[in-house]
Image (cartoon, grey):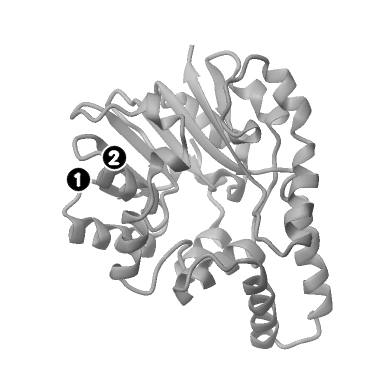
Amino acid sequence: MSKFYLNKSVLEFYKKMPFNIYSNSYTAIKSLKTNDPLSLYPPLKKIIKNKKNFNIIDLGCGAGWFANLLSYKFKNINVTGVDFNPRAIEFAKNIKNKLNLKTNFVIEDLFEVRSNDKLDLVSSLGVLHHTNDCHKGIEKIIDLSPNYICIGLYHKYGRKPFLSHVKKLKSKFKKLKKDDFEDRMYAEYKKLDARNSDELNKMSWFRDQMLHPKETQHTLAEIAPIFKNKYKIFSTSINRFKKINDLERVIESEKKWYDYALEKLEKKIYFPGFFIIFAVKK
């Protein structure tokens, strides 16, 4: 796979400040310890087996939150986090070492990843929509041939109200100098997102949500055909991870995410317009 798909502007953006980084290891570890991956992503309950030969790769792991979370909750499994940002990997390794975790971290372009191991799960959460070709990213994961795939992407309809809000704010503040512009945008972001008190972490979320140089949005209808020959989509956050008896009916319902996202925005509640799918090898 050519490095054509690696976006250098995105790499430089994250080198300045990795997404979901924390001010210090204490707050990062506290966040990790107070979250449960099985509650966040219920399908993992049936996927992860806490045994030594269970192998997971997290592509675009960033500061390592999800990879380290899995290693912390499941002591026997093998988790590898891959990211192209050395600064993010350095932070991830620091948390790993402080908790004495088994997590392995690698600095690599996700399109260049190879594995000789049998993979049980490949995850990529909030990453592929920042590459130059999201579809090629999904195809790359399929080529790794894991038993299960977990992908998180911005949703075309669920993301739209937030992006419209950001566009209006950018127009409102466009005449300000760069630092003043970002300060005003950050102040507006904090009106919506009151989830944590770690200032650096919140700033990393703000930059990711409002200042990112590259972003695309997608739908289940659009990406489902990429999987159909080799994988079956069996769960998605679009229907709250309920059992899928008819994928087409779930696809028909996804436009309702616009109304849901608009309602959240009107109530000044942060909603990024993000959806997750789980697929199993046929």
- Find residue 16 and report its horizontal and vertical position in percent: 48, 71
67 and 187: which one is in front?
187
Q: Name the residue under label 2.
A: 79
Q: Mark 2 and mark 1 in contact? Answer it, CB < 8 Å.
A: yes
- Find residue 169 and report its horizontal and vertical position in percent: 78, 72
- Find residue 76 and report its horizontal and vertical position in percent: 19, 35
Residue at point 19%, 45% (across, down) = 102
- Find residue 14 and report its horizontal and vertical position in percent: 49, 64
**Secondary structure of residue under mark 1:** loop
19 and 74: which one is in front?
74
Dot placed on the residue nearer the N-terminal end, 2 or 1: 2
Name the amino acid, label 1: Lys
6 and 155: which one is in front?
155
Residue 211 falls left or right of residue 42: right
Residue at point 44%, 37% (across, down) = 123
Residue 249 appears in the rendering: yes
Name the amino acid, label 2: Val
Residue 223 falls left or right of residue 255: left
Is 117 placed above or below 177 here? above
Count neighbours of disc 1 (C-alpha within 10 A) and say few if under 14, some if 14 to 19, many if 20 or more. Answer: some
Residue at point 67%, 19% (across, down) = 247
Q: Mark 1 points at which residue?
A: 102
Residue at point 66%, 53% (across, down) = 215
Count neighbours of disc 2 (C-alpha within 10 A) and say few if under 14, some if 14 to 19, many if 20 or more. Answer: many
**Secondary structure of residue under mark 2:** strand
Is 101 placed above or below 151 here? below
